Image (spheres, rainbow, N blue to C red):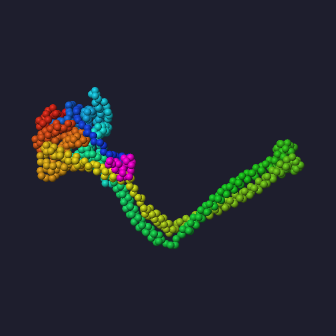
Amino acid sequence: MSKNWLETIADKADLSPEQAERRLRRWGVAADRVARPARSFTIEQIAFTGEKKGKTTGAIDFAWTGLGPGVWAVTSEINLRGKSTVLEVVLWCLRGSTKNLQDDVRGWLRHVSVQFAVDDECYRIAFDLVDGEPNGLLERRAPDDTFHTLQSFTSDEGFALVMAHFMMDALELDVLPALQGNESDKGVVEHGWLAQSNVFYLGGEHNYLFADTQMGGLPARLLQMYVGFPWASTKIFATTAKKELEQKSKNVDRARRSSEADAKAARTRLEAEIKAARKRISDLPTETTTADVLKQAGEAVASATRKLSELQARASKAQSEAAQVGETKLQDERIVRNLRETIVATQFFNGLNPECCPRCETKVATARIKAEASELACSLCAETIPEESFEDVSEALEMAEARAAASKAAAERAKADSNAATIATSAASSNLTQAQTELNELLKGADFAARQNAELDLARLEGALRERSAPHSKVEIDPDEGLISIAVKETEKAYNAGRMDILKALNDEILPLGQQLGIEALESVTLSSNASMSIKKGGANTSFSKVTAGERLRLRLATAIALLRVGPRLGIGRHPGLLIIDSPGKEEVAKVNLEALLAELRKIADEMEGLQVIVAGTNVDEIIGVLGKERCRIARGENFVW
């Protein structure tokens, strides 16, 4: 038994299938899903109300019910009667976003409702316009014909998001990734429902078979998905992942080359600047202050600073100690003096202090009172007080006097030390000032400053050159790059295996359909998987883009119908069977062509189950003649459709 897609990739990448699947899943790459029948999509009812404003006034009340498979038309005898509005309202409801609805018409609307079926399930979009914003519901009909809310919305953005989620899920469509942007700034974008819904709509200039733009390869991606090419989705994701990885490598390589070029230019510039800096240094006078001299001067300043700091600390300490010792000396002297005063007062005056002579009342002099304590002489008679009077306190007095003498000596020494420290501090301060002056004089030398600046500049340039000369780090390759490349190759093989048979079946259908729809000179068509179409018409080879707008419309119709025919027959395809065509008459040369086009469309719709075509155009009588009044909404004369 041969290996499947995942096993083959895992084996070539030297991984287990589980490892390969996990890493591929990060890039959205997965094996192709089993083909499933396309969902059918049918508009059943269209209704909207409002009020016209401006030159045209009046109530708006449009309702069209009973729609189903087949060809239906909105027609008027003249233009600008509201035909396109009906189609635009339908597109608005299906997309969640307007396509070409006129701003004035949108401003007139007050309520909009569109009912549609996906297979056998019926849904309804109904909303009011509140301050210009849609406010409404997406509902599903239950078996008892009541509607139940699935999602609500209150803004344009919310409406678009609700419909995108619903339609992608209901029609089983895949988001289509693509790499877009400038060469140096590409990124992955995802084409969701707004892009994919364009397959329903056939209007404008018909420049492309699918989509409104060629950007990001969107027409090819839409064709591959709606045709239902096996492995198409896997191919899209794998190819996008490969391009993204390649773009990442290109960006890294571009950045590396840019960095290397910048570094090379910088090295060239720095080498020239280094050469010039060295020349400036060599041109400076040689008789200049040397670095050693400057170093010595700097060290002298530092040493003087430290010395001054030490002496200042020492002087402060000496001053503090001198103050403390001086205070002790004063206290000891005060104690001695107090002891002596106490002795005299106690022994001779019983603790009294006589102020005058008890005999003559002469006042005792202050000098005698002081002498009594210091010289032990009586303040009244000046006679010496006998020492034996102090026997009880002599020992205390002697000790106090000894302490006072010691304190006095210590105070004198402390004061001498403090004075010496102050003198030393002053000398150290003078030394520091002199050292700083000498250093400043050296620094003022113009030659030295010039050399110092030149040497610093040279050192800076040499450092920058070393930095710019360092080898660049090796560019790391994404580990998934090899795996994705293998996945792309294996997916291409699977994709190409049945692709040509499907394209041949489509071409075989498109050719007769194109002829039936009015391109009588059509001889062959070749549709390619990139959504381009080669044509042979009237004996000349041409392409889709070069034929007339009317022929492009017919070829788009033929291609869409071919998808709907081939899909069910081969069990592939995702086209839901709805086509909305705006004003095909403007693409026609003669009325008979429009009649023939509509007649063939009706014939094809009668043959195909589930095809619904809604057309808007003038030529009322011709359209009614082909489709019948029961399938048309008609505006005669200058009347509006709504």
Residue 349, image quadrant: top right
Q: For the point 42% across and 59% down, which residue is it?
A: 473
The verdict on residue 6 being magenta is yes
Residue 563 to residue 630: above or below = below
- Considering every residue shown, the one lying at the far front of the view is 1
Residue 371 in the image: x percent, y percent?
82, 50
Q: Position of residue 188 (x, y in %)?
A: 32, 48
Answer left or right for 512 relative to 50: left
Image check: 20 left or right of 146? right
State whether the magenta stretch is mostly helix, strand or loop.
helix
Q: Nearer the viewer, residue 334 or 572?
A: 572
- Visible in this render: residue 286? yes
Res 83 seen here: no
Name the residue at 27% across, 33% down. 121
Residue range highlighted in magenta: 1-21
Which quadrant holds the C terminus? top left
Q: Is residue 98 above or below residue 336?
A: above
| In the displayed structure image, the side of residue 327 where residue 465 appears, left or right | left
Q: Residue furthest top?
A: 144
Count of numbered marks: 0
Q: Residue at x 18, y 51 (%)?
A: 534
- Indicate left or right for 630 with 218 as reference: left
**Residue 472 lies in the magenta-colored region:** no
Task: Give me the residue at 16% from left, 52% from top.
Answer: 542
Nearer the observer, 11 or 447: 11
User: How far from the left and from the top, in percent, is residue 14?
Assistant: 38, 52
